[in-house]
Image (tube, rainbow, N blue to C red):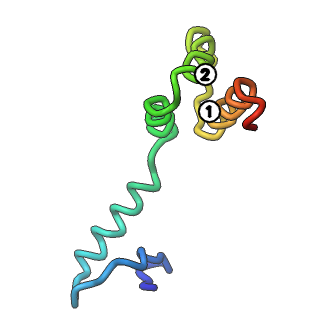
Amino acid sequence: MIRYKQNKVLDPGVTLPRNSKTFMDKEMTRREQRRNYSDKVHIDKMKEVIPDELQNTLVIYEITNRSPKTWDDYLKLLMQAYKALHPDKA
């Protein structure tokens, strides 16, 4: 495990060239960017992959402008809708 500024840990698979502070800075920037996606990005990506039947259940929320704005709330709503559609699988 490699530690870098402020006790942040790099991915274990990362190998470091000698004297490569620039490499470390770039790697930490990439990791920070991956972590800092907004909720809207996650919600948009989820909309691309959920099945049509589940998308159809969420239409009323989108029409009335009551769709959840946070990732956690959106995920909870998807889980509730899935459980309602498939009680045998829940």
- Mark identifier at residue 74: 1
Quick check: 73 above or below 11?
A: above
Binning the other alpha carbons within 10 Å of mark 1 as few (below 14), some (14 to 19) or many (20 upward) gives some
Q: Is residue 46 left or right of residue 64?
A: left
Tell me where residue 67 sits by quadrant: top right
**Where is residue 90 shown, x and y percent of the image?**
75, 38
Marks 1/2: CA–CA distance: 8 Å
Indicate the position of residue 54 as horizontal and vertical percent values.
59, 24
Q: Is residue 5 above or below residue 64?
A: below
The amino acid marked with disc number 2 is Ser
Residue linked to disc 2: 67
Name the residue nearer the viewer: 86 or 65. Answer: 86
- Which residue is situated farthest in the front direction here? 88
Residue in the image at 60% along x and 19% along y: 58
Name the element at disc 1.
Answer: helix
SS type, badge 2: loop
Circles 1, 2 touching at the beta carbon (< 8 Å): yes
Q: Quadrant of residue 80?
A: top right
Q: Please give the name of the residue rendered at 57% of the width and 9% of the height, measured from the top-left corner.
A: 63
Residue 52 lies, in percent from the top left, at: 51, 21
> In the figure, residue 27 lies in which quadrant?
bottom left
